[in-house]
Image (cartoon, rainbow, N blue to C red):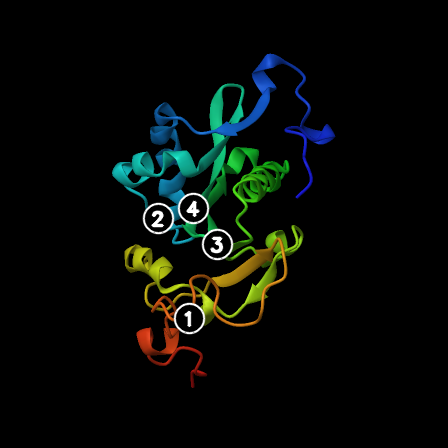
């Protein structure tokens, strides 16, 4: 990813009240992050997160701060030597449509590149958004098994309707995404979810 500015022209502030900063999260941001997560989790568009979960993963997060208030966030969670996931990506409804989600995602991708993680994926309902950043859609069955451990907390489990998207910083062969095939890290979703993909009468 190329270096990006924190602010696009459309979001340049008119005053200190409107000042926008995208920065790594700190522990004191966690309660504000949870306040943003909870409504999305209630609507089943994001996995619920406890305060414990968020404190333990605070170093994964970038936050969008507008006028000193947390307006959005996203996390980069490293799963393997060469694989990371973008997760818990959201912008408060009052601040949507300003490009903040794309800016924080670019920052997360820059962090993945800094860590020399070659491949980043996400589970999402926003296919168009991720495609605009160069991601491609892949079969969810190719994802590493450990990511499904959080799914039991989702209201839609086991009938997940999110799509999987992947961004490759360098070429990869076709096949399972993540740890080497000799490690039992790839799950067959059709075994986990009987009837997945079958047409309903």
Q: Residues within 10 Å of mark 3 (few under 14, many from 20)?
A: many
Q: Is residue 174 above or below residue 73?
A: below
Q: Residues within 10 Å of mark 4 (few under 14, many from 20)?
A: some
Residue at mark 3: 83
Residue at mark 1: 181
Q: Nearer the viewer, mark 2 or mark 1?
A: 1
Q: CA distance from mark 2 to mark 4?
A: 23 Å
Residue at mark 4: 77
Q: Nearer the viewer, mark 4 or mark 1?
A: 1
Q: Quadrant of residue 98?
A: top right
Residue extending farthest to the right is: 9
Q: Secondary structure at mark 4?
A: strand
Tag 3 and tag 4, C-beta contact below 8 Å? no
Of label 4 and label 1, which has the lower sequence position? 4
**188 to the left or right of 172:** left
Tag 1 and tag 3, C-beta contact below 8 Å? no
Residue at mark 2: 42
Q: Secondary structure at mark 3?
A: strand
Q: Secondary structure at mark 2?
A: helix
Q: Quadrant of residue 53?
A: top left
């Amino acid at each position: 990813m190329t270096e990006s500015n924190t602010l696009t022209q459309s979001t340049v502030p008119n005053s200190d009240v409107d000042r926008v900063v995208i920065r790594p999260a700190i522990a004191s941001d966690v309660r504000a992050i949870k306040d943003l997560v909870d409504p999305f989790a209630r609507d089943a568009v994001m996995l619920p997160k406890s305060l414990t979960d968020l404190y333990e993963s605070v170093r994964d997060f970038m936050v969008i701060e507008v006028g000193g208030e947390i307006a959005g966030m996203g996390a980069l969670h490293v799963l393997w030597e060469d694989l990371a996931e973008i997760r818990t990506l959201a912008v408060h409804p009052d601040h949507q449509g300003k490009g903040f989600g794309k800016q924080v995602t670019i920052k997360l991708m820059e962090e993945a590149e800094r860590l020399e993680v070659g491949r980043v994926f996400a589970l999402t309902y926003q296919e168009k958004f991720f495609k605009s950043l160069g991601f491609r859609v892949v079969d969810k069955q190719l994802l590493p098994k450990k990511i499904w451990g959080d799914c039991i907390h989702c209201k839609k489990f086991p009938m997940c309707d999110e799509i999987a998207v992947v961004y490759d910083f360098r070429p990869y062969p076709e096949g399972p995404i993540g740890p080497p095939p000799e490690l039992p890290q790839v799950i067959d979703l059709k075994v986990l979810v009987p009837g997945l993909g079958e047409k309903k009468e």
